Every structure is written in structure tokens, then in C-alpha cells.
Amino acid sequence: QVQLVESGGGLVQAGGSLRLSCAASGRTFSAYTMGWFRQAPGKEREFVAAFTSWFSDSTYYADSVKGRFTISRDNGKNTVYLQMNSLKPEDTAVYYCAAAYLLARPTAEAHKYGDWGQGTQVTVSS
């Protein structure tokens, strides 16, 4: 089990940028696939991006954020990041960090992630 704490959310104008961070506890961070999900009011939770570094570095993005968002991780700092550029009002949501242990590749399947953070609000104004 790993504890996750997100930070970096806030209010930004459309076209702007934010970087989210997710700090994880534990000593085997590199064994976890780290994912970002988001949930807008009245909508289902949706996958944003994921990064697996257990076998080799591999990332996976939702089509809606591809080319605008970048997921990265620093295994020495037990932290995963989500750099969000060219933000749009439709990116407004609570963003959650999640961890899945010993997956061979990144996945958008939320049920495979066993640990979740408390979420951080991102609001993009038009």
C-alpha cells in the first residue's frame, strides 16, 4: 500500500499551464504504475495519463490530452508529475493520482489502481 498526496492545482486562464505533483510514501515507488485521473462535476471519472517504469519507461495518454499534457516521474523523490499546457475550460476537474503495483504497462483501467490520493482541484477559466 502507498499513500499519495497531490498538490499544484489551482485557477488558470485558458491557454495557461499548471504542473501537478503527487508524492508517494513507501520504498518501492518504482514498482508502481502511476496514473492521473480526473472527475468533473456531474461526470464520470476519466483517465488522463499513466507512467510505468517497472520494466522500462512507458507512458499512455488519453486522446483528449495527448500533445498538451506530459506525465513524468522522479523515482528518487517518489513523485509523479503532470505538466498541463494549453489548458482548456473542459480540463476543469478534480485531478487524482493513483498507484497500481507491478503492472507491466500503463493502463487506463481505474480498477487496477489500488491506491488513490485525495485529489486537487484544477479550474480553467475561459
Image (cartoon, grey):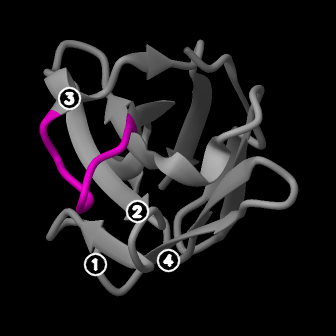
Name the N-terminal-most of marks 2 and 1.
2
Q: Nearer the viewer, residue 126 or 49?
A: 49
Q: Does the segment drawn in magenta span residue 108?
A: yes
As measured in the structure, the alpha-carbon distance from the residue carrying label 2 to the one carrying label 1 is 17 Å
The amino acid on which the numbered mark 4 sits, given as a three-letter code, is Ser
Callout 2–callout 4 Cβ contact below 8 Å: no
Q: Secondary structure at mark 3?
A: helix
Circle 2: is it few (<14), some (14-19), or many (20+) Cα within 10 Å? many
Q: Earlier in the sequence, mark 2 or mark 4?
A: 2
Q: Could you say which disc has been placed on residue 112 in the image?
A: 3
Question: Comparing marks 3 and 1, which lies closer to the viewer?
Answer: 3
Residue type pointed to by label 2: Thr
Q: Is residue 83 above or below residue 75?
A: below
Residue at x 19%, y 63% (from the top left corner): 62
Circle 1 residue: 66
Name the foreground residue: 125 vs 95: 95
Is there CB contact under 8 Å for labels 2 and 1? no
Which callout, 1 or 4, points to the residue nearer the camera?
1
| Label 3 close to label 2 by CB (< 8 Å) | no
